[in-house]
Image (cartoon, coloured by chain):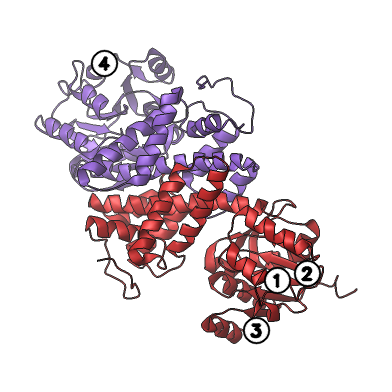
Chain colours: A purple, B red
Amino acid sequence: MTQKTAAIDRVSVIGLGSMGHGIARSLIRARFTVVGCDPNPDAAARFAQEGGLVTSTPAEATTDARLVISAVLDGKQTADVLFGSEGCAKVLDQGAVFVSVATMAPNEGRALAERLASQGIYYLDAPVSGGAERAADGTLTILVSGPAEAIDIASPVFAVLGQRVFELGTAVGDASAFKIINQLLAGIHIAAACEAIAFAAAQRLDLSKVYDIIKSSAGNSWMFENRVPHILANDYSPRSATDIFVKDLGIVLDMARTARAPVPLASAALQLFLMTSAAGMGRDDDASIARLYAQIMRIKMPASPNPQTSHEIG
Amino acid sequence: MTQKTAAIDRVSVIGLGSMGHGIARSLIRARFTVVGCDPNPDAAARFAQEGGLVTSTPAEATTDARLVISAVLDGKQTADVLFGSEGCAKVLDQGAVFVSVATMAPNEGRALAERLASQGIYYLDAPVSGGAERAADGTLTILVSGPAEAIDIASPVFAVLGQRVFELGTAVGDASAFKIINQLLAGIHIAAACEAIAFAAAQRLDLSKVYDIIKSSAGNSWMFENRVPHILANDYSPRSATDIFVKDLGIVLDMARTARAPVPLASAALQLFLMTSAAGMGRDDDASIARLYAQIMRIKMPASPNPQTSHEIG
């Protein structure tokens, strides 16, 4: 067996934030050697403590790498990881597989894949759903599209990271397109949950009862169940930040305009995330839309304030 | 034991449409004597065939009744059932319990309850969630508020009709307020599901795969799971009609304006139901918003047309 066809036992992880950190942990637990980097020294130190090999740049982290997982914020950061001055495209060998899990527009991933293909490097479009907790548990939903031989190489790693892996064909961008549909719905449902709870508070209803009733009624959503407890606890420390949906619904709106597809609810939801970000809560939990409503209507949400929560508008 | 304190063994059901018919069936199955009426002769005939006692008017159906369930469309029809020329308020005895399951604004129910209270007749505010199928199965979610002694009398009947019964205090209108929160979310989620599927179709994605992926992702909702199969089958025969949400989101918007509570997503969703109704699909299934999008964008949804579906715009 040559080095190229042996099973992968080492993975490079670029970006050790909430998603990358969880992915690295799952891989370490499954006995992979994990080489990583992150510009944030705290994230890098946490990774080292957990048994990862810390490097300083994407180029260092991926020297001799056969499989790279890039877990940064968006398409722009992914382009920088690949083609920036310390990027990994210049050090990766022919046949290496670069897996991007960031949520980005399909055409962004396609452009990156084309540049890499000219060097004989594979790009896999592999956005994930499930958040930081499920990344660390190895129970993500993974959507993947790209060259079949690259998916074969990455499959054992996807099996470690994901509870469900949807293979969506050989065209880079297709997996991202499916992910964007999910983000359209997720963003609207968060904003709807916040609108419903704030409206219920304005009607002076018992919000815990609202939560219990909706959970067993036709008005329920995954996001309602997941986010409303943050509102009931008045805890807006970020599990997923408002600005993530400013980005993701921004992608939806750009794609929709290009496709001449009207998306009025996604458009209205984006404005609510923007308002919440404009009010200083962009880095707080995305359920902060409810807090914005409460502040605008000068109504009290049920619980006492959480000292972790720093952003308030006057 | 006097007649007044004996267990209820006969129930009057006013309105034998999809909800009233299901309720009547559940009661007949549980060996109640059920007396009903409906202006639609087909609905009345179906009820007679299933063992119900048909009468011609609410007054006839409720003579000597101790428990009445009114399952008509809205507050206006409920007022007519009670106080119209053939209404039951004039024949009901003191101590009788009138249960309204229609979705209406809280203040509509309160006004009806006050008029009945002056005659010594109880009004229970008891909106339900779950649709026609769960009404027939006896697995509704029932929200109820009103005088405790009236809830005691009606409880054995609620136990037959509902899988979950939420008792929400003694004030008529409170149960309706909770129901309206559910309708706000349900309406937005139906419109969001249609927007997402139409946007996915515009991106030429495989819609069955979209459905499978979203069901196991954070973008899921009860309504997405329930309504998208109608779109995939291109079957818009009404399980719940577009005009129901024109009504229910109209109530949301009225209440929100009175309360000075902004509800931008509910407002946008109402416009989509209105557009769909304006295009001739008001009596079709509420997933028809997706069909409107497909028609506007001149894209084909996946399956072949269903001959039951009669309304199309040019």
Please report, as a chain letter, where disc 4 is located: A
Q: Which numbered mark, 4 or 2, is in the foreground of this view? A: 2
Q: Amino acid at mark 1?
A: Val
Please report, as a chain letter, where disc 3 is located: B
Number of the label disc, if any, that sits on residue B55: 3
Residue B101, placed above or below residue A160: below
Residue B75, placed above or below residue A248: below
Q: Residue at the location (62% across, 67% down)? A: B78
Number of the label disc, if any, that sits on residue B68: 1
Q: Are callouts 1 and 4 both on one chain?
A: no
Distance, label 3 to label 4, CA atoms, is 82 Å
Query: Residue A203 at x, y = what percent?
Result: 62, 43
SS at circle 1? strand
Number of the label disc, if any, that sits on residue A49: none
Give neighbour class at mark 1: few <14, some 14-19, many 20+ (Cα, 10 Å).
Answer: many
Q: Which residue is mark 2?
A: B96
Q: Are callouts 4 and 2 both on one chain?
A: no
SS at circle 3? loop
